[in-house]
Image (spheres, rainbow, N blue to C red):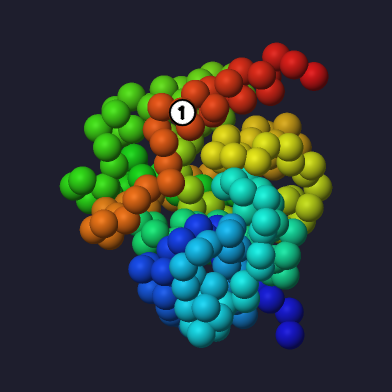
Amino acid sequence: MSVDLSVVIPCLNEEKTIAICIQKCKQSFQKLNIAGEVVVVDNNSTDRTAEISIAEGARVVRCAEQGYGNALRCGFKNAEGEYVLMGDADNTYDFLEIPLYWNKMKPELGMVTGSRIRGNIEKGAMPWKNRYIGTPALTFILNLLYGTKLSDSQCGMRLMRKKCLDQITFKTTGMEFASELYVEFVKHNFKIDEVPISLYKDVQGRIPHLRPWRDGFRHLRYLIKAKFTK
């Protein structure tokens, strides 16, 4: 049976939250009455992430090359759906909001990306420096250099057409891959639109993978380099 939507979830030691993420995806598939699959990309986890994912009905793909970009590229390659939605495994993005993305997607669009800025950010879900410095600055630079009109360039939950992804040769392997997605969609003339979404706090005790200053600089360096070098 053909798959309408593949949800790709990159994972590194997310045994505390991966089950609820998969369950929410399946609830959204049912609500939309579509054929969906959850592709969990295990990026060298040392906990029970893969075991739990399989038990919840997800398809687990192993990605030996460490890095956020590597994991997503592996997931995109293995996705079987006509559409692909990427989202984090920490349950800060709500996979019950998949219908918001699905209903926003139009024939002329290649991507629907979320906007936490235009949506709802739970108190404590986003550090002050990310909310008021990092995200606005990187969004401004993306819009300025590439002509986009986004309000939140750092949102990690996005819906894309698989045929668009298949036409792109990605190069980055780390967190800056999130910026490369936008840049390549612009370069290929694939239109992007936004939908307001929610962001929630991490579960207590979880160690975040994001390192704001280091990763922010990698985004900035990529955006400038991609614009001014061939």
Residue toward you, 191 or 133: 133
Q: Is residue 141 left or right of residue 169?
A: left
Residue toward you, 14 or 140: 14
- Residue 81: horizontal and vertical position, in percent? 69, 69
Residue toward you, 102 or 218: 218
Q: Which residue matches tag 1?
A: 214
**Tag 1's secondary structure?**
helix
Whether 174 is drawn above or below 95: the answer is above
Extreme front residue here?
46
Tell me the quadrant of the picture where the C terminus can be found. top right
Would residue 198 be visible to someone looking at this image?
A: no
Task: Count all numbered tags in the image, as a single digit.
Answer: 1
Would residue 128 be visible to someone looking at this image?
A: yes
Quadrant of the rendered image containing residue 223: top right
- Residue 118: horizontal and vertical position, in percent? 34, 42
Quadrant of the rendered image containing residue 183: top right
Residue placed at 37% from the left, 48% from the top? 208
- Residue 86: horizontal and vertical position, in percent? 55, 57
Residue placed at 48% from the left, 48% from the top? 156
Residue placed at 50% from the left, 58% from the top? 12
- Residue 60: horizontal and vertical position, in percent? 62, 72
Tell me the quadrant of the picture where the N terminus can be found. bottom right
Q: Is residue 45 left or right of residue 168?
A: left
Whether 73 is drawn above or below 103: the answer is above
Residue type at the position of mark 1 = Arg
